[in-house]
């Protein structure tokens, strides 16, 4: 297993992930533009440094967890590729567009590095607990090394395919999740109008052909799934603004690839509206209130 990790991007997700690398006994040189994030990483056992270049100079593995595609392209093209030892494994765990992921992978490969797009499923709680699921796009020969590098942060690491396939898997999964949540939400609205108790409908649907994760693990009606965000005022969980970001990535990718995704397009439009109405910070399952016509609840 690697001993020297460089970790760039210590935000809501990266902060916890870097600490888990450190808890596994690895030396973690950590960098973020935010002083507060750097300080937290230092207190948790990482070694805060003053720049990307300093973090990566003798790294065996470089991990990035940055906001979006432009940040990833800039940091890799200007600060990592050519500056890190060519023996270093480069892993980008951010959620970004497939095109940028492939561009960075090609640049890294040309310069002699092993690179993977390795976006995650699971929110900040899973990042803190070291129980994220990683979807990896990489050369097959590099996968074992990648799995070892991610191990302290992971509950499951799955190779999706070649470069870009990790990001493709992430946006396909989240597009389906957005669509299924809206389906469940408008169905709850219909049940209610028909005088069918949504709590009783849960018992039926969770054992019938309408069954899906948005019902069994996240049902947005108080009661049936105690851990669902509806039972804590739609706080925590997966923010609407984040779901919207992923739905936009899916629509951009679909347009470029010539895929027909009308339900994904509708999901994006509905989440954009819900966000525009000021609900971007609420868990994405709160869209049930808009579809029930009860936005103030
Ligand atoms: P965040 O905004 O909390 O963290 C990003 C960090 O990157 C910030 O601390 C920022 O200062 C830092 N940063 C930006 N540019 C930098 C640079 N040039 N050099 C060094 N540091 C820089 O975001 P997050 O919630 O941690 O999410 C990170 C990524 O993970 C995103 O792509 C997001 O879509 C994805 N993701 C998030 C969640 C979630 O629940 N939060 C779940 C799955 C995936």
Image (tube, helix red, strand yellow):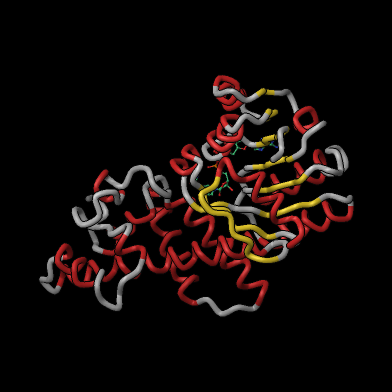
Q: Looking at the picture, how far across and down is residue 127, in whole percent?
A: 50, 41
Write the residue at 20% across / 53% down: 222
Quadrant for the N terminus in the image:
top right
Residue nearest the viewer, comparing 59 with 147: 147
* Image coordinates for residue 157, horizontal then vertical, percent: 58, 54
| Residue that extends furthest to the left in the rendered view of this protein | 195
Q: Residue at x 70, y 47 (%)?
A: 91
Residue 108 placement, left or right of 1: right
Q: Position of residue 147 (x, y in %)?
A: 64, 50
Determine whether, in the image, residue 197 is placed left or right of residue 292: left
Image-based side of 134 in relation to 290, left or right = right
Residue 206 quadrant: bottom left
Please, which residue is most extreme toward the front here? 1
Ligand 1 image-quadrant field: top right
Q: Nearer the viewer, residue 296 or 173?
A: 173
Residue at left offset 68%, top offset 60%: 137
Count of numbered circles in the view: 0
Residue depicted at x 26% and y 71%: 187
Q: Compared to 179, does 152 lie above or below?
A: above
User: For residue 64, what is the image quadrant?
Assistant: top right
Looking at the picture, tell me which residue is in the foreground, 106 or 267: 106
Q: Is residue 259 above or below residue 165?
A: below
Where is residue 99 shown, x and y percent of the image? Answer: 71, 62
């Amino acid at each position: 297993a690697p001993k020297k990790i460089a970790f760039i991007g210590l935000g809501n997700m990266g902060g916890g992930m870097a600490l888990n690398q450190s808890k596994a006994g690895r030396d973690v040189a950590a960098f973020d533009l935010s002083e507060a994030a750097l300080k937290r990483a230092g207190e948790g056992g990482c070694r805060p440094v003053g720049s990307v270049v300093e973090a990566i100079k003798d790294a065996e593995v470089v991990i990035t967890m940055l906001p979006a595609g432009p940040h990833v392209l800039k940091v890799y093209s200007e600060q990592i590729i050519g500056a890190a030892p060519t023996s270093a494994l480069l892993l980008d765990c951010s959620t970004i567009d497939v095109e940028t992921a492939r561009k960075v992978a090609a640049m890294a490969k040309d310069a002699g590095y092993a690179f993977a797009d390795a976006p995650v499923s699971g929110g900040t709680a899973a990042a803190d607990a070291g129980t994220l699921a990683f979807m990896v796009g990489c050369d097959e020969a590099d996968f074992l090394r990648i799995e070892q590098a991610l191990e302290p942060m992971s509950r499951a690491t799955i190779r999706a395919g070649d470069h870009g396939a990790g990001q493709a898997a992430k946006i396909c999964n989240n597009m389906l999740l957005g669509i299924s949540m809206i389906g469940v939400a408008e169905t709850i609205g219909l049940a209610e109008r028909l005088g069918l108790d949504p709590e009783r409908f849960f018992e039926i649907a969770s054992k019938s052909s309408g069954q899906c994760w948005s019902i069994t693990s996240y049902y947005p009606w108080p009661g049936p799934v105690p851990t669902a965000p509806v039972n804590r005022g739609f706080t925590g969980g997966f923010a609407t603004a984040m779901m919207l970001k992923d739905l936009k990535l899916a629509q951009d990718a679909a347009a470029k690839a010539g895929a027909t995704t009308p339900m994904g397009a509708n999901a994006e439009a509905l989440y954009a509206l819900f966000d525009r109405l000021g609900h971007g910070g609420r868990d994405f399952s709160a869209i049930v209130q808009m579809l029930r016509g009860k936005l103030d609840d």
